[in-house]
Amino acid sequence: MTAEPLRTGDGTALRVETQPSLPGLGGLYARGAAASGRIAAGRALPGLPVIGAGRSPSDTDHDGGPLTLPDVAYRVAGVSTAGLGRHLHEYQRLLHEPVSDVLPAGYLHVLAFPLATAVMVRGDFPLPLLGMVHLHNAVELRGPVRLGDALEVRAWAENLRPHRRGVQVDLVAEIRRDGGDPAERPVWRGVSTYLAKGFSLPDAPAADDEPRAEWHLPLPTGRWALGPGTGRAYGAVSGDRNPIHLSALSAKAFGFPRAIAHGMYTAARALADVGHQRGDAYRWTVEFAKPVLLPGTVDLAVTQEEDGFEYVGWNGRRRQKHFSGTVTPL
């Protein structure tokens, strides 16, 4: 079944394929692991939030041609939120969001993430799911989404481009109110940018080294004490049970000394710390740096700026930044 046409940011036309329901992450990760079977077991990874371990470098896709993204967007209509009350409240308690019938922007990411992951495990997706380094996220929420709302979710990949350590790609997910005007802007839109290390694009100019902005240690406005089970707790509500988040033993197999917190857990926890001043509509960004080892303590600073809020989380003992971002009311 094919829905209305869709285009990426650069104008590339996409075929919209309607799926019967949102997939489960467990089966998707199994498919991603199978597709990445040539990965060297236990390959060490750099200090960034990741999804597993990479595969052998290549600058061609499965057919030997240049790396190209699938020209397909997945769509699931009629996604009911009426039965998500208990799950939503578990998320809100874990992330320190107020308990209400409003779905926070981070929860909407959890809702849409499996469909974006389904795009990444397609047979024609040229990069391995296992090995993607999560670099940053940009989210736009244009109004409240409440329990009981019926939604439509879409996801696709776009903007494959060089990175100094490989190639990066955007996974775009959008949420609309089901049955609404397809020409209207989505109520929620998230762009997750990932790095595939060691890959390259033929004839693409080399990516310049990213300048390191000078960072001055701010005064903390909060401190999180994260226990060893933080990754398991977020994995239970998000479905993201990647071994690097679950235990020290499973994380060591991927080069980490201990389990690490999910990047989106830390981003969503910081969003909650911004509080009600963000309003019902806002832009939310996060840049990931060093992972948060569990158990661990994160110092957080939320500062109000002229057009919104900035936040940064760091390791106070090592003076090491974990993440930073902005929340800008619309």
Image (cartoon, rainbow, N blue to C red):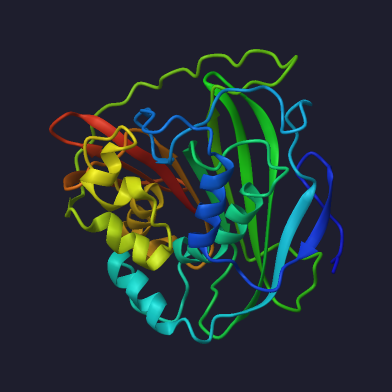
Q: Which percent across, then down, holds residue 279? A: 46, 65
In the rendered image, which quarter contains the C terminus?
bottom right
Would you say residue 169 is visible in this rendering?
A: yes
Compared across the picture, whether 304 is left or right of 113 comes to left
- Residue at position x 68%, y 45% in the image: 157
In the rendered image, which quarter contains the N terminus?
bottom right
Pick whichever, 21 or 303, lies toward us. Answer: 21
Q: Which percent across, then down, holds residue 241? A: 38, 57
Q: Does 199 sit above or below residue 135?
A: above
Would you say residue 301 is visible in this rendering?
A: no
Compared across the picture, whether 214 is left or right of 181 comes to left
Q: Does 234 sit above or below residue 160?
A: below
- Residue at position x 73%, y 39% in the image: 69
Compared across the picture, whether 233 is left or right of 306 comes to left
Q: Which quarter of the picture shows residue 80?
A: bottom right
- Residue at position x 22%, y 35% in the image: 257
- Residue at position x 36%, y 60% in the image: 235
Q: Which percent across, then down, holds residue 226? A: 19, 53
Q: Which quarter of the picture shows residue 97?
A: bottom left
Q: Does 32 sit above or below residue 152?
A: above
Total labels drawn: 0
Q: Which quarter of the picture shows residue 151?
A: bottom right
